[in-house]
Image (spheres, rainbow, N blue to C red):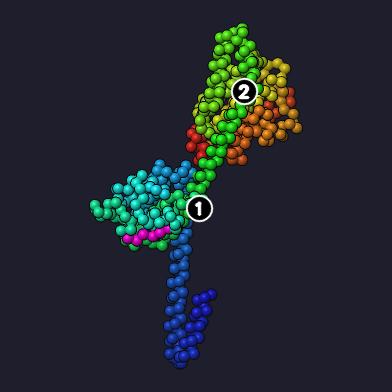
């Protein structure tokens, strides 16, 4: 629309000031010139649009591949992997990543004296950290290379972009070129876009870290609330046993100390299923001292699933709930069964009992916060922790029939290390 207006105005001007054949000659000359300029403008816009689309594609590709590393924080170990990805995909001469004080990683051509842990020497980098605004360095002198006085350094220009988390600069990313002043607008736009995306990922990683700390704090609080009634009942059983069977009482005390040692000293949000089941069996030994043959237990877990990672202190509360509300109130013997089954990349762990069951009107309330088993470490707590760790897709499902029994199914992703749990949530 703008070009059409310009053409009309210019043509009208020359039609007014010229006459005859000259008028016709000028008409064609100016028309061709304006058309040529219009085509150049369209090609430039098309090229700029394509460059923008390519930069966006590269930035998102880099962001996608670096996400698992940034979710674990910005440190030397992760920075090296991130720098390799950026250099490979961005096809730049070299990449450097720093925090606020030192270099975390350097990948690509250039000075061998660039090592993780080196203090930041470049004044331009300091300026970016202080101002939070990107900077372009077009001369080798500004790069302040530690080898400039030793030999020729191939690095001659760079764009330095701040990495921000919650508005605060936490580091920088630097893309280098080997020719002085040779920093294309595409490279600069790529660096800026990449810095913004990586900053968002750093914030997401920080949020994940805070959520994990909150989950740890909640777990520690739950561990401090282990049912005092259970403790008193076991102690009373030990006292009564000590009169008739001192050796058995001694063994029970050892099991009790092991129970609390495992519950209070275990570290990490996730532990192997094998370790959690050892905790469950110790709990059941103590309960069987009270109930004798009334309480039976069956474990049906494939050996290959014993190394699967589960939230710490998650199965034991379900077993305790089955004993307390299912078997204890039943007339006659009762059986608690724990099964584990892999379905694709997910695992289902069921805790079932053949006890008194749950009334239908009560079943809808069991997983609501503050209800559970009433002991502070109930099913509601386990359910909320699973959702917090893995998302709304996961958690507990309860099936129960009065007089027949109850089955609680724990649904979670199959992971073999605690780090895989983080990747699963990404």
Query: Which of the two discs, 1 and 2, labels the residue nearer the N terminus?
Result: 1
Above or below, 272 relative to 171 = above
Where residue 158 sits in the image (x, y, percent)? 36, 57
Reading the image, the residue beneath label 1 is: 167
| Label 2 environment density (alpha carbons within 10 Å; few <14, some 14–19, many ≥20) | some
Above or below, 61 relative to 284 = below
Observer able to see residue 189: yes
Given residues 357 and 202, the one toward you in this image is 202
Where residue 35 sits in the image (x, y, percent)? 46, 77
- Indicate which label's residue lies in the foreground, 1 or 2: 1
Residue 138 is covered by the magenta coloring:
yes
Marking on residue 15: none
Q: Residue at x 49, y 50 (%)?
A: 165
Q: Residue at x 44, y 65 (%)?
A: 47
Where residue 371 sits in the image (x, y, percent)? 69, 32
Q: Secondary structure at mark 1?
A: loop
Place residue 232 in its image quadrant: top right
Query: What is the magenta range?
Result: 134-139
Place residue 140 in its image quadrant: bottom left
Judge left or right: residue 260 versus residue 88: right
Reading the image, the residue beneath label 2 is: 337
Asked if the residue under mark 2 is in contact with the one under mark 1, i.e. CB atoms within 8 Å, the reply is no
Spot the residue most to the left: 150
Spot the residue most to the bottom: 20
Given residues 224 and 174, the one toward you in this image is 224
């Amino acid at each position: 629309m703008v070009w059409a207006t310009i053409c009309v105005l210019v043509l009208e001007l020359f039609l007014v000031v010229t006459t005859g054949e000259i008028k016709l000659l000028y008409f064609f000359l100016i028309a061709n010139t304006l058309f040529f300029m219009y085509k150049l403008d369209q090609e430039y816009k098309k090229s700029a649009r394509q460059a923008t689309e390519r930069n966006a594609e590269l930035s998102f590709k880099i962001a996608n591949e670096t996400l698992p590393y940034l979710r674990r924080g910005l440190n030397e170990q992760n920075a090296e992997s991130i720098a390799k990805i950026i250099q490979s995909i961005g096809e730049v001469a070299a990449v450097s990543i720093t925090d606020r004080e030192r270099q975390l990683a350097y990948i690509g051509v250039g000075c061998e004296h660039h090592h993780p842990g080196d203090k930041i020497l470049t004044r331009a980098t300091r300026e970016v950290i202080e101002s939070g605004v990107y900077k372009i360095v077009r001369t080798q002198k500004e790069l302040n290379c530690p080898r400039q006085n030793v030999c020729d350094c191939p690095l001659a220009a760079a764009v330095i972009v701040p990495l921000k988390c919650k508005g605060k600069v936490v580091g920088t990313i630097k893309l280098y070129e080997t020719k002085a002043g040779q920093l294309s607008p595409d490279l600069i736009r790529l660096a800026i876009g990449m810095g913004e995306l990586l900053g968002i990922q750093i914030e997401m990683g920080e949020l994940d870290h805070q959520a994990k700390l909150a989950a740890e704090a909640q777990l520690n609080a739950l561990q401090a609330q282990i049912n005092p009634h259970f403790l008193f009942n076991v102690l009373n059983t030990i006292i009564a046993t000590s009169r008739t069977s001192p050796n058995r009482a001694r063994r029970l005390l050892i099991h009790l100390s092991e129970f609390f040692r495992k519950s209070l000293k275990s570290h990490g949000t996730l532990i192997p299923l094998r370790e959690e089941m050892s905790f469950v069996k110790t709990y059941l030994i103590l309960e069987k001292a009270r109930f004798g043959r009334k309480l039976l237990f069956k474990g049906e877990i494939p050996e290959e699933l014993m190394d699967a990672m589960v939230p710490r202190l998650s199965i034991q509360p379900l077993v305790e709930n089955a004993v307390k509300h299912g078997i204890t109130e039943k007339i006659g013997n009762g059986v608690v069964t724990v099964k584990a089954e892999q379905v694709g990349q997910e695992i289902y762990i069921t805790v079932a009992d053949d006890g008194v069951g749950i009334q239908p009107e009560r079943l809808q309330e069991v997983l609501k916060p503050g209800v559970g088993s009433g002991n502070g470490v109930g099913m509601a707590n386990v359910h909320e922790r699973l959702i917090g760790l893995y998302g709304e897709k996961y958690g507990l499902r309860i099936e129960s029939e009065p007089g027949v029994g109850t089955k609680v199914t724990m649904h979670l992703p199959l992971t073999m290390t605690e780090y895989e749990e983080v990747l699963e949530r990404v």
